[in-house]
Image (spheres, rainbow, N blue to C red):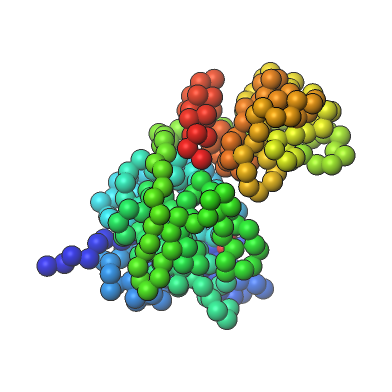
Amino acid sequence: MENRPNLQIYALGGTIAMVPAATPGVHPTLTADDLLAAAPELSAFAQVSAETLLNKGSANISFDEVAMVCRKVAQSDCDGFVVTQGTDTMEETSFLASLLHQGKQPIVFTGAMRSPTQPGADGKANLVAAALTAVADKTPSVAVVMNDEVHHPFYVTKAHTSNVAAFQSVVRGPIGQIAENNVFLHPFQNHPTFDTPDGFAPIALLTALLDDDGRMFDHILDAGYKGLVIEGFGAGHVSEQIADKLADIAKSIPVILSSRVRAGVVFEKTYGYRGAEMDLLSRGLVPAGRLSGRKARILLSLLVSLYGEGWQQEFSNVVKHV
Ligand code: ASP
């Protein structure tokens, strides 16, 4: 009797699927079937089907397309899923998927730092490791697997432009590793998930910069953004000039305070000077905890779209899990 688990690969493009084409450089070309054909090892431990949903550079993936992948997963009875895509935005797509995927079957995102025709191409190894993780016991509902490490979407970030070890979970390290075809996972905390909204509210992300007069901030409301995330200096600080602009914006739309530093929590009760976190929070900003600005932007977009003015309670609830 067949006892291998059913595994579904959804391909979205990215370097793992990129080969030289008619115009210079590599371009997204290979299909999900091509990726599967290049990795016959998968059939040793899973019955695999493959489908190409998109074939593009990951900068072009939309929130709606991530929701579409989650919807397909919800409609399938497969035991596990691998999503192949570009690494550039994987920290964002996987984070959104982790908020939208309400089922238990794992969705494991993977890709490649080197295209299939480059020496030392890592796509096949990543695909096999991701597939093993997708059918392993106790894999979180969404994970990122790159370079034989399993990362939680809340923490993972692309931290190098070319190294095959580009993916890091800066706050807490990977939640697992793959060795000798075994998946070793550390315990992790479950977090809230949400329904998919009809559309996603546009949220801006701006970064505090030394000696910036903040003229960009003057256009946020006119541009129609429904929220703003500011990546402050250090533990959540901006200049006095920017602090006043943020306080004004926060009278109209949600403003989240995150940090441009890659690791650590946004402070809430240490620095009291004008432009520091205590001042900003007292003037209506909401702290992102340990969520990066990019992830806070995605969470805010989802929650504003679902709950309108009731976004804040759910936001704080998710931040507690980070
Ligand atoms: N530019 C590519 C992409 O994100 C990079 C990659 O896949 O690693 O689509």
In front of the other: 259 or 69: 259
Q: Nearer the viewer, residue 23 or 66?
A: 66
- Res 61 seen here: no
In the image, residue 270 lies at what x, y percent?
70, 29
Going by the picture, which residue comes out furthest to the front?
Answer: 270
Q: Is residue 2 left or right of residue 132?
A: left
Check the picture and name the quadrant holding the N terminus. Answer: bottom left
Location of residue 201 with respect to 140 vertically, above or below: above
Query: Which residue occupies 49% across, 57% down?
Result: 174
Q: Nearer the viewer, residue 48 or 278?
A: 278
Locate residue 252: give its quadrant. top right
Establish if 154 lies above or below 83.
Answer: above
Q: Position of residue 259 (x, y in %)?
A: 68, 40
Residue name at image x 22 percent, y 66 percent? 4
- Residue found at the very far bottom of the displayed protein: 119
Extreme residue toward the left, this view: 1
Q: Quadrant of ligand 1?
A: bottom right
> Could you tell me which residue is drawn at 43 percent across and 59 percent down?
176
The quarter holding residue 286 reads top right
Position of residue 310 measured from the top left corner of the image (x, y, whole percent) = 51, 21
Q: Is residue 70 left or right of residue 48?
A: right
Up-down: is 218 above or below 298?
Answer: above
Q: Give x and y (percent) for residue 118.
A: 58, 78
Place residue 211 in its image quadrant. top right
Give the number of marks. Answer: 0
- Is residue 315 in sight in this rendering? yes
Task: Identify the residue shown where x is 50% and y is 67%.
Answer: 147
